[in-house]
Image: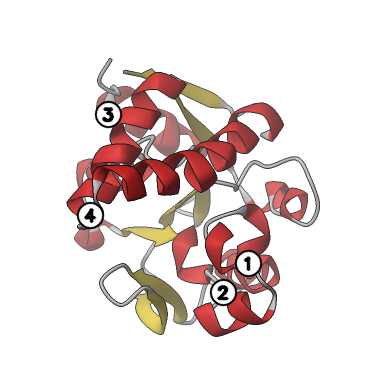
Amino acid sequence: MTPDLDALAARIMATQSDDCRILVAIAGAPASGKSTLSDRLCHHLGGDEAGAAVVPMDGFHFDDAILKQRDLLNRKGAPNTFDVGGLQRILAALKTETDQDVYVPLFDRGLELSRGSARCISPRHKIILVEGNYLLLGQAPWDQLAPMFDLSIYLDVAETVLRARLLQRWRDHGFDAASAQEKALGNDIPNAITVSTKSRPADVTVTSS
């Protein structure tokens, strides 16, 4: 089903009070549609002009150099390949430093690296949509993020659908069929299972197909 943007926007607006800044977690497995939903929802809420902004978790990927040192490059995208402490500090700043600009990193998929201070969240941004796989993960250190969120949304997508999307994603990135299957089944699907089995219950669950 297609997410009901009107209903989600209404739930977000009902969570906000006195024009205070709120942080909304949008979580789900790889290829569940988090980025698409976040962008569409941000636009539905009025976008930048209305004070809505998106902060992607992917900006906190460890650099490939660190992953190579830790022998984790082939698991890039797994929970232990992100700077969770850095994400937590940025979320804390967004919650408490509401009178000043906060700069957040963005992941560049063309370059396969994060670009620091690539997006500015200014005091006028009152609704922050934070999207990422592991935002609701109930294991350390990810479980420290839960208190940061005023509302959480989880995208529930069947594993068969995720497999098809992930295979197509890697094919679109130029991988042949065998390599795409290795990337999807060797890393992405295990990560998806981690998300689906170890995430905390969300305030809102959107079942999508």
First in sequence: mark 3 vs mark 2 = 3
Q: CB atoms at circles 1 and 3 under 8 Å apart?
A: no
- Which residue bears the numbered disc 1? 72
Q: Residues within 10 Å of mark 3 (few under 14, many from 20)?
A: some
Q: Distance of mark 1 from mark 4, alpha carbons?
A: 36 Å
Q: Kindly report which numbered mark, 1 or 4, lies closer to the viewer in this rendering.
A: 1
Q: Position of residue 72 (x, y in %)?
A: 63, 67
Secondary structure of the residue carrying numbered label 4 = loop
**198 with respect to 209 (left or right):** right
Q: Position of residue 58 (x, y in %)?
A: 46, 62
Three-letter amino acid code at the position of disc 1: Leu
Secondary structure of the residue carrying numbered label 3 = helix
On the question of residue 42 being in view, the answer is: no
Image mark count:
4
Q: Residues within 10 Å of mark 4 (few under 14, many from 20)?
A: some
Q: Residue at x 57, y 58 (%)?
A: 75
Q: Distance of mark 2 from mark 4, alpha carbons?
A: 29 Å
Q: CB atoms at circles 2 and 4 under 8 Å apart?
A: no
Three-letter amino acid code at the position of disc 2: Phe
